[in-house]
Image (tube, helix red, strand yellow):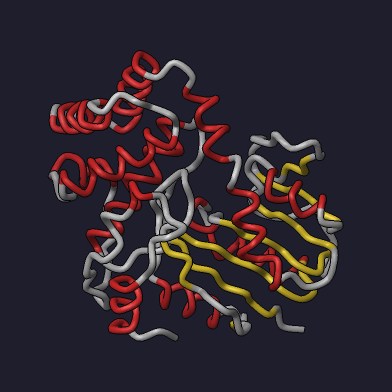
């Protein structure tokens, strides 16, 4: 497990060559680690202004830029609207609707921009995970738009897409499930993917244990992680804004952990960490400036 001081060093020294330049404001920022993050509702964060406006503004700039928005004042106006509505006592649903209306009035083709922004994501995730896949049968659990699974299928893997909601845009069928019990026999897949899924799950442990039940060899997890309370608040804002304002209907319970917090969770569930080249993926995706961590987990026999 990485020590806190080593994580700080990695963040400070991480190269930004493959990272969207709009996210470089977070790279190199010293983050105090080892502090326990309190769980608090996002509406409380907004009402109390407990997240730095500068950090929040850069995060929103990043997301709207990735959607193709060229209006340089848009992020500032969105943040001002969020703060005003929150402080006037409005709930998250009303704030979501207000932000959606503002976005639609200023960005002509928001969903097309989102589609374009996601186009490189499947290739990136394939490059990050391919060497850790065990066998040829793969369950993409929480498959979202299905494009990662489709990329794997094109490489010769037998892929099953599965999710609680249907956002599938891939030319493959999707298996919907109830979020509790997977409709597959035990040890049915060589590898299961959980790609930024657990922090969106109402019961992450139940999802993890079902993944263990249906998997023979390995579970590959990519998670959006946080290092301290300020970082957690930032993740909450980014997650909510992207999945509830730009996108629609994605469940956001904000189940974020530190990298070592996830390691403890996996260890408690008898999942052993497999050796990998680089767990620290950093801010790697062009869509949201979330800090990602990769785990390859050996399923107990």
Q: Going by the image, does 198 lie left or right of 238?
A: right
- Residue 219 in the image, given as x and y percentages of width and height: 67, 70
- Residue 101 in the image, given as x and y percentages of width and height: 35, 17
Q: Going by the image, does 43 lie left or right of 66?
A: left
- Residue 291 in the image, given as x and y percentages of width and height: 40, 60
Q: Residue furthest front?
A: 17
What residue is rendered at 46% in x and 62% in y?
Answer: 292
What residue is rendered at 40% in x and 31% in y?
Answer: 245
- Residue 154 in the image, given as x and y percentages of width and height: 82, 50
Quadrant of res 28: bottom left
The image shows residue 45, relative to residue 83, as above or below, that is: below
* Front residue of this view, candidates 108 and 180: 108
Q: Going by the image, does 159 lie left or right of 275?
A: right
Quadrant of res 152: bottom right
What residue is rendered at 63% in x and 83% in y?
Answer: 274
* Front residue of this view, candidates 173 and 205: 173
* Front residue of this view, candidates 20 and 206: 20
Name the quadrant of the N terminus.
bottom left
The image shows residue 132, relative to residue 156, as above or below, that is: below
The total number of labels drawn is 0
Name the quadrant of the C terminus.
bottom right
Q: Going by the image, does 28 lie left or right of 187?
A: left
What residue is rendered at 61% in x and 84% in y?
Answer: 275
């Amino acid at each position: 497990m990485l020590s806190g001081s080593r994580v700080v060093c990695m963040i400070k020294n991480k190269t930004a060559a493959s990272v969207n330049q709009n996210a470089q404001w977070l790279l190199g920022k010293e983050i105090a680690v080892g502090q326990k993050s309190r769980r608090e509702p996002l509406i409380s964060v907004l009402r109390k202004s407990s997240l730095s406006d500068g950090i929040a503004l850069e995060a929103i700039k990043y997301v709207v830029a990735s959607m193709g928005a060229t209006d340089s004042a848009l992020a500032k106006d969105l943040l001002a609207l969020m703060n005003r509505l929150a402080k006037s006592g409005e709930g998250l649903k009303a704030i979501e609707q207000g932000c959606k209306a503002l976005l639609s009035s200023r960005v002509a083709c928001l969903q097309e921009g989102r589609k374009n922004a996601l186009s490189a994501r499947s290739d990136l995730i394939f490059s990050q995970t391919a060497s850790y896949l065990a066998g040829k049968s793969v369950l993409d659990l929480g498959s979202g738009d299905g494009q990662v699974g489709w990329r794997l299928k094109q490489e010769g893997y037998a892929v099953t897409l599965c999710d609680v909601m249907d956002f599938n845009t891939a030319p493959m069928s999707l298996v919907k499930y109830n979020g509790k019990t997977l409709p597959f026999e035990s040890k049915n897949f060589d590898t299961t993917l959980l790609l930024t899924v657990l922090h969106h799950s109402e019961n992450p442990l139940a999802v993890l244990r079902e993944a263990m039940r249906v998997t023979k060899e390995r579970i590959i997890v990519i998670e959006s992680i946080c290092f301290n309370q300020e970082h957690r608040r930032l993740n909450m804002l980014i997650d909510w804004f992207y999945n509830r304002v730009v996108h629609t209907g994605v469940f956001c319970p904000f189940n974020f952990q530190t990298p070592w917090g996830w390691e403890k969770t996996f260890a408690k569930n008898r999942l052993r960490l497999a050796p990998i080249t680089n767990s620290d993926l950093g801010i790697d995706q062009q869509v949201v400036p979330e800090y990602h961590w990769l785990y390859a987990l050996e399923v107990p026999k």
